[in-house]
Amino acid sequence: HFKKFNDTHGHAVGDEVLKMVARGLEESTRKVDFCARYGGEEFVVIIPEASSEILERVAERQRQRIEQECLVHEGESLSVQISVGGACSADICGLPEAEALLREADACLYEAKRAGRNRSVCRSVERVVVTR
C-alpha cells in the first residue's frame, strides 16, 4: 500500500523508500542480474539462467532484505515490506516470449498480494508460447 505510505509521510519520503528498495534489490542479486523500476512502486529483476530453485531463493532473500531495512524520518524509523512475483522458463527465444514471462511474473506478484502481502510467489513455466 505504497499510496497510503506516500499520503502519510509525503512524496519525498516515498521517493527515499523507492531508492532504499532499489538498493536492497541490487545488493541481493548478482552482477549479471538486472534490476529496474518497472512502474509506480513495482520493480523488475531479471536473473539470467535461473532455475526455479534459484528464483525462489533470490525472491525470498530480496523480500527479507527489504523487510530488514529502515529509513529514519523526523525521528521515526520507517520500514516497508514487499511482495515478490517471479517466473522462470528455460525456453525463451525472443522479446514476445520474454514479455509473456514478464506477464506471468506480474500475475505471481498479484497472487502474492492477494495472499496477504509480504510474501513471494514464483512459478516455473515449462514453455512460453506466443502466437500472433
Image (cartoon, rainbow, N blue to C red):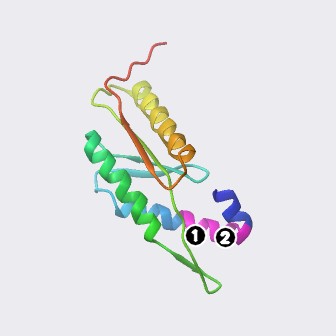
Front-most of 12 and 117?
117
Q: Is residue 14 left or right of residue 47?
A: right
Q: Which residue is mark 1?
A: 16
Residue lying at 37% horizontally and 51% vertically, measured from the top left = 59
Give the structural element (helix, strand or loop) at label 2: helix
By secondary structure, the bulk of the magenta-drawn segment is best described as: helix
Front-most of 40 and 4?
4
Using the image, determine if residue 76 lies above or below residue 11. Answer: below
Which residue is at the far right?
A: 7
Q: Is residue 106 left or right of residue 55?
A: right
Is 16 part of what is drawn in magenta? yes
Q: Which residue is mark 2?
A: 12
Using the image, determine if residue 114 lies above or below residue 95. Answer: below
- Label 1 amino acid? Glu
Give the structural element (helix, strand or loop) at label 1: helix
Quadrant where the N terminus sits is bottom right
Is 30 part of what is drawn in magenta? no
Q: Quadrant of residue 52?
A: top left
Using the image, determine if residue 42 lies above or below residue 95. Answer: below
- The location of residue 104, given as percent across then percent down, is 46, 33
Which residue is at the far front?
A: 115
- The location of residue 110, given as percent across then percent down, is 54, 41
- What's the magenta region? 8-18
Q: Quadrant of residue 128?
A: top left
Q: Residues within 10 Å of mark 2 (few under 14, many from 20)?
A: few
Assess whether mark 2 and mark 1 are in contact (beta carbons under 8 angstroms).
Answer: yes
Front-most of 100 and 79?
79
Residue lying at 43% horizontally and 18% vertically, measured from the top left = 130
Which residue is at the far top?
A: 132
- Label 2 amino acid? Ala
- The location of residue 77, given as percent across then percent down, is 57, 80
Give how far apart the Cα atoms at labels 1 and 2 are: 6 Å
